[in-house]
Each structure stands twice: as structure tokens, then as C-alpha cells.
Image (spheres, rainbow, N blue to C red):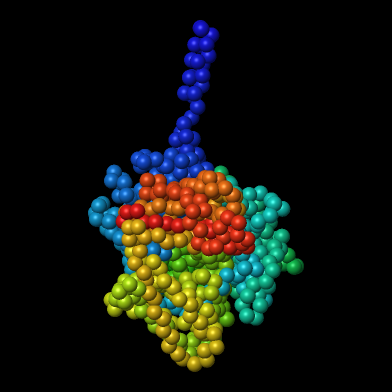
Amino acid sequence: MIISALMLFASIVVAQEQPSLRDRADELYSRYEYANAAKLYTKLVDTRKPRLQDLERLADSYWKMNDYESAENWYARVTQQTDGSPENLLRYGEVLKMNGKYAEAKKQLEAYAKQTGNTPFVAVQIAGCDSALRWMSSPTLHRLQNEAAVNTVNSEFSAFPVGDQVYYAGEPNDESSGDTYGWTGNAFLRVYTAPLSSEGALGTPSFADADINGSKYHTGPVVAGENDNTLYVTRTYTGKEGEQQKVAGHNYRTQVLELYIYHKENGKWVSEPFAYNNVKEYSVGHAAVSTDGNLLYFVSDMPGGHGGTDIWYSEREADGTWGTPVNAGPEINSVGDELFPGMGPDGTLYYSSDGFPGMGGLDIFRSMGNKSQWTKPENLKYPVNSASDDFAYLVYGEDETGFRGFLASDRKGGRGGDDIYSFSFEKPKIIILLKGTTSDKATGERLPATAVTLYDGEREIVAKQQSSGEGTFEFVLDRDRDYTVLGQKEGYHADSAKVSTQGITQSDTLEVALLLEPVFRVGQTFELENIYYDFDKYNIRPDAAVVLDELVRTLRDNPTLKIELSSHTDSRGSHAYNETLSQRRAQSAVDYLVSRGIARNRMVAKGYGETRLINRCADGVACSAAEHQANRRTEVTVLEY
């Protein structure tokens, strides 16, 4: 008896010493292991009354992971809590802006300002939301193309043409690249070259000369100087002397930058440090050279600036050396960060900033002038800028018909982290208009303030606007392209139509009518199209997850909606087995929605087995695999709204 009691006591002590699920989640969160922490917090919040801090840390984990779609789901839950901090409204607004939902973001930012009285703090972001809505409704003539030949799952950016080649910075994606950078887990940046075609496309890349890539840490970006025998290369020092300094632009992911000047001597690149590098005090990097070669612009957080990182310049002295750095002035520098300056053929300065009204993250601006005298910065608008970070804008090949160039962005639809995009800007020879209407399908009445999105054939957003008070909209289309136009409004099923300009050779006007059907009537049932399960399985397939994510958005955007999520099987197998299988399928779908931020008490999982077949494939009827799969479907019934 005494031995048993001692053993019981020992087991209790051990149990008490084991960290709880929350302890493990908090420990991972404190160690910046956000992906692992999120998995545990997801379990912790799957309860009727989750803790606010668990929800906040889960939402913040996805924010830190740059998974803004998931972060939006969870911040929507966080801001529904009555005891939350106003800071949650601020972060929710920022997440919505990163997802391109500017009208919704503005509401949250204004709610934050009203609760805190800190209107000046969010004034720039609110102004950016207003501007973004206008810019997306009337895009510029820039046409962007992802340069798939050079882009990988990692980051590539800062393309700079030199002759028939382009230099750019990228993260190697193979094990042979050597050491990795602990912050990202990826290899240190290296400089690449890629052939540049006459049409402006990039070909198969290769590492630049070993003389350039000789640094132990990050190397790049690169720009050429007054001739192709001079390169200005940004390198990164990550040693102990520089650990206290950090450039704020997260795309570059560096700590302390140094600028090195490379000269070609006897066929080899020989480097010398820029005279004003100072890794113990500040960063210097991201060079740009004026068209006459007498001014060197660069980015630094050295003392005397206006914000985080500013644009500075040095003048070439009579002996060829660079003079003492001078700040480029308050017109182009803000309280935020200015990064990645570049000079256009006509002397225009292009650069990125997060300190002026913009679409989200870093936006690209332009200004005319030199030294410390500049015109007011002009945002390059959409599609040059997006809800993500856009930077490293470079123009070349300019003539009377237009121009072309490169930029970098981590916008949605890319191949990895930061991607290189080529762009062209050509003046239109003909004008093709798309005019449309948005209406209630049941009554025929026009629906104003409907979100109308124009997609191209690759499902990339071309333009976005709200229909007018009369339920009308208008877009300018390109020649020889296929489009989809989508109308969305709360309380309605979306409607879409396809439009093509293939073969149109003169100015024309196309018309389309979008008819949106009311949704969310109690008792209404609709099928989730393309939600299928493998035979005898109940796991959520990747193609099904994409469709379920749409249901996540519907539930997230309609917080009073409660549903029954039902699953149906084909007729193969016994009735009892199929009922059990369908229940598991419905439950797995509900579990997936819970993992994406929807409260479990808003959903009921119901399996109907083979009792509601939609075709002839009952017991004993010979059917094809496709016919059977059609019965393995998922439906949604509105319970409350």
C-alpha cells in the first residue's frame, strides 16, 4: 500500500512537471517559431470560449509568417472579442490592407482611431486605402510579366541590365550554395546573371563571377556605374559588430549593409569598400548612379536622416573619389523607410517607401530633380504597386512609343518570396471598353456598391472597382486577351462572365450583365462545387481545400451565419458504412474550417451516406468512376442568418 501510494505521488509530480499545451505554445511563440506555435494555438482556441491571448498570438503568428490570408481569418475572430485591445483593430486593418481589401481596412483603421484618438498615427494608411481604391479602378498602362525563368520558391530581386545580360540578387535554392542565413533558413544572397532577349525576357540564369560572389554573407544587389567596368555591390555584414543595426525593409532581410565598388582589372573584378561604410554605426547600400556618373545615391540609416532609412548622395570629387554623404532631403525622405533607389534614362529617381500613402508594404515612387532638390514624390499606382512589397523599379529602353523595365514584388500569384517582374508601357493604338451592370437576379433591380474584379486568363487581378450608384461599371481592356469579370456583394452569391478581345482590331465597346442571386435564406441548400473525396477516404484533398477556403471567407465575412455542412457518398459499400464514412467526411470538412479560424459552434456536421444520390448510380447499377464521384459531394444548408 505504501509503495503504491509513493508510486502514485511520483506520477502526480511527474505530471505536474510536464508543460501544458499552452506552455509549449507560449515557449515556441517566444522563440519566434511561429509555424509550430500556430499548430498548438489552433488546438487551444478550438473551444466555446477561447482565451483572448491565445487568439491574439495565433493571429500574430500568421502575421509574422506573412500568411496574411490566415491572419485575416483569425484577426476577424480576435476583433469580435469584447475585451480586446484597440491594437487588434490596427493589426486587423493592416492585414486587410495587405490582402487588398482597402474599404474593409479603412473601416478597421478608423475604428482604431476613434477608440484611441490617435488619428494621425493611421492617417497615412487611411489615405493609402482611399488612393488604392481609385488606382485599382483605373490601372496604368504597365503590363507585368513574372520572369519564370529566373524566379524560384526563394527570393529574386533587383534586376539591372548590363549589355545583353542582367545582374540580379537571389537566394540559392540548392544545398551546394553553402552556409544559410539563420533568420530565413535560406542560403545567403548571391549575384546571378541571366541573358536578356530583345523582347525584354530573361533566360536561364547562372552565378556571376566568383570575384563578385566572394563574400561570406549576403551579396547583392548590383548596379553598373558610368561604364560596364564598374559595379556597385551591396554586401551584408552580419557579425557581432553589426548585430545592433538592422534595415527595416523586410524583403532584403539584412542586418548591416556595406557598399563595395568593383573595378575590372586584367579580366578580374577587384573590390574596394565605399569610404563611408561604418558597420558599427549604420548601414550603407542600394546604390544608384546619376546618368552623368557624377552623383552616387544610396540608402543609409546614418545619423541626420528623417526616418528609418533615407536616400543620401555623394558627389564625385576632382580626383575621382566620392565626397561626404549628404541627405537627399525631406521631400523624398519620410519618417518611414526609403529603399532601392534607381535612376531612369531621363534622370527620374525611382525608389520604394512605406512612409507615404500607398497600397501596402513598400510602394514605388518617382521624383524629378537632383541632390537635395526634388519634386513631390508620385506614387506609380496599380499595377506597378500592389498590396504587398514592391521595389527595385528600373526603366530602360525608353522611346516615343513607351518603355520597358523590371521591378520586384512579393505580391500574390508569384513563384516564391520576392519575384522579378518585367514590365512594358505602350501607348494604346485602339481603345476597347467593357461596360457592365450588376443586378439582383431575383428582382432585376440594380445593385450599387458591388465589388467588381477583372481577372486575366491567368486569374491575376487586372483591375477592381465598385459598381456605381446605378449599378454600372467600366473597364479598359487590352487587345488579344481573355478576361473574367466577377461581381461580389455581401448577402449574394457571386456571378461572373467571360469576355475576350481576341481578334478585335479597332476600338470597340463590349457589354456584360452580372446577375447576383440572394443567399443565406434559412433552409437554403447549395452544393460546394468540386469538393470531392477519394473512394473510401475522408481526408480533405488539396483541390477541396481551395474550395473550402472560399466557404471560410463567406463565414468570416458573415459572422451571424450558421450552417449545416453535409456530406454524401456514392452507393458502393453498405448503407451503414456509407453513413459512417459520410459523417467522417462532413466532420473532416468542419475540422478544416475550424483550423482556418471559424468557430466550431457555428457549424453542424451531418453525414447522409447514400440516401441522397443525384444520379442513377444506385446499388446494382453499373456506373463510371466520374458518375460515382459526382455523388461524393459536400453541401451547405443555412441554419441561421
Residue at the image position 57 percent from the left and 70 percent from the top: 146
Q: Is residue 370 left or right of residue 230?
A: left
Residue at the image position 63 percent from the left and 53 percent from the top: 187
Looking at the picture, tell me which residue is in the foreground, 300 or 532.
532
Residue at the image position 67 percent from the left and 69 percent from the top: 194
Q: Is residue 81 above or below residue 120?
A: above
**In this view, which residue lies farthest toward the front?**
620
Residue 373: % across, % down: 40, 73
Q: Is residue 415 shown to the viewer in this render?
A: yes
**In this view, which residue lies farthest toward the top?**
2
Residue at the image position 62 percent from the left and 73 percent from the top: 161
Quadrant in the picture for the C terminus = bottom left
Looking at the picture, tell me which residue is in the foreground, 109 or 22.
22
Q: In this view, does 286 lie to the left or right of 135?
A: right
Looking at the picture, tell me which residue is in the foreground, 282 or 145.
145
Residue 278: % across, % down: 53, 53
Q: In this view, does 144 lie above or below 340?
A: below
Query: Residue 509, located in which quarter of the rendered image?
Result: bottom left
Query: Residue 306, located in which quarter of the rendered image?
Result: bottom left
Residue 190: % across, % down: 64, 59
Looking at the picture, tell me which residue is in the foreground, 40 or 626.
626
Q: Is residue 273 shown to the viewer in this render?
A: no
Q: Is residue 143 above or below residue 97?
A: below
